Image (tube, helix red, strand yellow):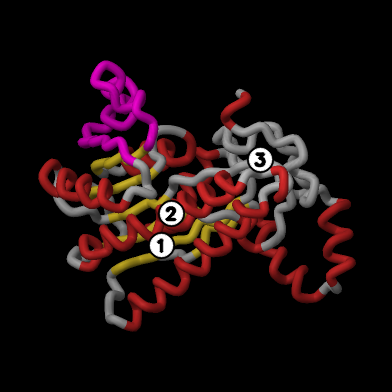
Amino acid sequence: MKNFKNKNILITGGARGLGKQIAIEFASKGANIIICDLNESFFRPECFPENIKEITSYGVKCYGYCLDVTNYDKIQSVKNKIHSDLGKIDILVNNAGVVFGGDFLDTSIEKHKITYDVNVIGVINFLHIFLDDLINQQESHIINISSASGFTSLPGAASYASSKSALTNLSESLRIELKKKGYNHIGMTIVCTAFINTGMFNGIKEPTFIPMLSQQKISKKIIKAVKTGKLFVIEPGFVKLIPFIKSIFPRPIFDFLGSVLGGFKSMDFWEGHSKK
């Protein structure tokens, strides 16, 4: 997809962080923005115009809907409102996600379930409901925000890492299904990055060779990937080596490298949004 002017972009978790930055980048290209988020205060009438002014400054339309990505019926209802307000969507950005740091047994079962409900089921919900929009457009695209942790272990965030692995495999499987059905006009981009400076990973210790990433930089790379039809956005470059390293080194050596380089200790001091 080369031109985003007047395209309708739906972004889950678009009220802040990477989601909002993606919204700003698409708006700068002339796209209309639809933000779906759980943050009620973001959508208050007295706050919403101010919260989206950086988006609307580009002369585009921006609509917002407060919802929980795990609520299938609510999403269906919001879809009807979107069609009434703006029309069918052209690009779906599944960005909403959660992470709870802590050892597996120290993390409540409720938090484990929420992680999967938001990071996996939430994506499935939006895909299931909005795929017909994408199928019926001449050109459309799916952007799923996964994680580099989907390629490897992330002690201290086992549910998060495994949910992102599930999302990456879901994305690749769906891409092939759509291709088999002849829906070659639907592009797919899977974003697998290390830690981004959105606040979700406040307090983490950056592993060697894997610095904290800029959400502005990543959002620009995502837009470029959609334009060029690139399947994966993997950042930083070292992350691309992880599957190769896992395949050639015996497990004890891989575990040693993970400890020495800091990858297996990065979540030890996680704080996240709540403590900042």
Q: Residue at x 24, y 21 (%)?
A: 45
Identify residue for label 1: 228
Q: Is residue 177 visible?
A: yes
Q: Position of residue 52 (x, y in %)?
A: 31, 28
Q: State which quadrant residue 102 falls in.
A: top right
Q: Secondary structure at mark 3?
A: loop
Q: Which residue is identified by label 2? A: 224
Residue 249 appears left or right of 155: right
The magenta stretch is 38-67
Query: With 122 as the anchor, is 107 left or right in this view?
Result: right
- Is disc 1 in contact with disc 2, using a CB cutoff of under 8 Å? yes
Q: Position of residue 236 (x, y in %)?
A: 64, 52
Task: Report how far apart the C-alphas of labels 1 and 2 lie in the structure.
Answer: 6 Å
User: Any magenta on residue 209?
Assistant: no
- Image quadrant assignment for residue 267: top right
* First-in-chain label (3 vs 2): 3
The mark that comes first in sequence, 1 or 3, is: 3
Q: Amino acid at mark 1?
A: Thr
- Looking at this rendering, what residue extends furthest in the front direction? 109
Residue reaching furthest to the left: 84
Q: Say few, some or many: other residues with alpha carbon within 10 Å of mark 2 (under 14 / 14 to 19 / 20 or more).
A: some
Disc 1: CA contacts within 10 A as few (<14), some (14-19) or many (>=20): few
Q: Secondary structure at mark 1?
A: helix
For disc 3, the marked residue is: 212
Position of the N terminus by quadrant:
bottom left
Q: Amino acid at mark 3?
A: Met
Alpha carbon distance from label 3 to label 2: 21 Å
Along the viewing direction, whichever of 182 and 5 lies nearer the viewer:
182
Q: Secondary structure at mark 2?
A: helix
